[in-house]
Image: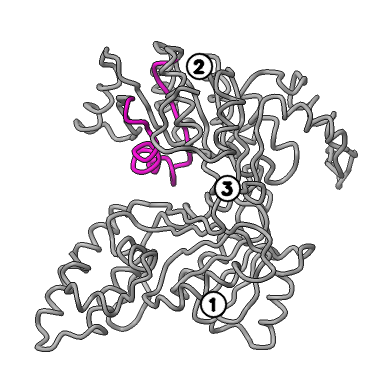
Amino acid sequence: MRYKFKHEPYAHQLEALKQSCNKSYYAYFMDMGTGKSKVLIDNVCILYDQGKIDSALIVAPKSVYRNWELKEIPTHLPTHVEAVVVSWSPHKTQKKLKELGTLDKIDHKLKIFLMNIEALSTKRGYEKATEFLSCRNALLAIDESTTIKSPKAARTKNLTKLRKLAPYRRILTGSPVTKSPIDLYSQCEFLEEECLNQSSFWSFQNRYAKMVRRTISTHSFHSIVGYQNLTELNTLLTQFSYRVRKEDCLDLPDKIYIKREVELTEEQKKIYEDLKNNAMAFIESKELVTAPTILTQLLRLQQLCSGFTKTEEGIIVPVKSRKIEELMATLEETQGKVIIWGFFTQNLLEIHQAIATAKTPEGDLKYGPESVELFYGETKSEERQNIVERFQDPNSPLRFFVGQPRTGGYGLTLTEAKTVIYYSNGYDLEVRLQSEDRAHRIGQTNKVTYVDIVAKDTIDEKILQALRSKIDISARVMKEGYKEWIV
């Protein structure tokens, strides 16, 4: 392959490219942390180098689509490719209209348009995507493609129509089957009509699901009671997909670190600025500035980033945050058991509630109350060992361990998890390292992925950078001065 990579791919990434490179449609079923975003970007650029495409439309959930613009594309786009990258916005500001206009400029540059999947449920979003694809040779990709697993959803129907305007199509997900094999139909139909040798969703369901007729009162309906012909289905999938599991990637490091960024809401931005100004005024009013004084002010900024603030009387005031959306989107991409660490009790309660009550597009419980347990200061001592034992039991329905690092980050063995998510971080480096080792210790047979959810351009990023660099934050804030952390 003569293509000039910006960063050399791992063996499994190179193999994914070799198999998919010139295919009109393909599925990257690659575990989170194995680098499917890089594979897609390289595939886009290879097709562009060959003159087969001049554009790409990448569709992803609202909580992550900007990450393509801010991180993935700058990191992996090769230096020899000139590209124009524009993100969709429903707001018709002069700045955004000017940005969108650069997509129409006639030149040799690769045009990359990023849209959130939710926009494809709207008339304006669908029309803009149609306009973009209609006058170009483009690759159309869906990141986290389980977002179109429901055949009845407007976004699914619209993307299936858009498929016909793109000579190349790709889907990316770590977990193509989140609930049942039936989840595959719409994702694969987007790639190519009848690529699964079925003419409709109903014929696909009848082929691979065992159905019985049930009657409740005067209402009669078909219900799935099991699945069949799955070996045949897997054989069909292998013709146009590449499956990568972390444990099969021998060249990956044992610990994989991922940062997923969210932007503050407009309300958060306003309050954040007020808190920064108040923090500066408070610290400057002190004759003696100590590390605890500075850390207390940083804590208030961090609380806001995580979706709440406290009044002087200690009353918690919720503030809308995009972190919970990002967490739920991340869970869609995971398989197996997951540890979720949060520094603030308020967040732990919110996370527990969100997971326990999450619904599928059809209105069914996605995970259910039995899938999640809290492990924090309020958890009774007699319940703690039982929670750990159930989490470590591969046959137990308990899938999500939601805990506070100071409570659960020491001594516990949680090696059934191969994904660890930090919703928020504390300042103590030892606590962070200890909490990481709950999954990465003797008994762990898989590579572990650590995901940090951070609010962009805030104290979150500075704290994470210090922890990743194994720096003691208390000492650093005194050495650098509070302005470096607050401003």
Residue 220: quarter of image: top right
Q: Is residue 329 above or below residue 486?
A: above
On whether residue 58 falls in the magenta region, the answer is yes
Residue at the spot 80% in from the left edge and 24% down from the top edge: 203
Label at residue 409: 1
Q: In this orientation, which residue lies closer to the viewer: 441 or 381?
A: 441
- Residue in the foreground of this view, choosing between 128 and 112: 112
Give percent across and percent down for residue 394: 76, 63
Between disc 1 and disc 3, the foreground one is 3
- Residue 78 place in picture, x, y as percent: 36, 31
Dividing the picture into quadrants, the one containing residue 28 is: top right
Q: Which residues are magenta?
A: 53-80
Foreground disc of the pair 2, 1: 1
Name of the residue lying farthest toward the front: 2
Q: CA distance from mark 1 to mark 3?
A: 28 Å
Q: How far across and down, in percent of the image, does residue 376 sit?
A: 55, 79
Alpha carbons under labels 2 and 1: distance apart: 48 Å
Please say if 62 is above or below 487: above
Which amino acid is tagged 3?
Asp
Q: Of marks 2 and 1, which one's residue comes earlier in the chain?
A: 2
Callout 1 amino acid: Gly
The three-letter code of the residue at mark 2 reads Ala
The answer to whether mark 2 and mark 1 are in CB contact below 8 A is: no
Q: Nearer the viewer, mark 2 or mark 3?
A: 3
Residue 24 appears at what percent x and percent y?
58, 17
Badge 1 or badge 3: first in the primary sequence: 3
Q: Secondary structure at mark 2?
A: loop
Residue 3 located left or right of residue 265: right
From the image, tell me which residue sits under label 2. Answer: 166
Judging depth in this view, the residue of 153 and 436 nearest the camera is: 436
Q: Residues within 10 Å of mark 2 (few under 14, many from 20)?
A: many
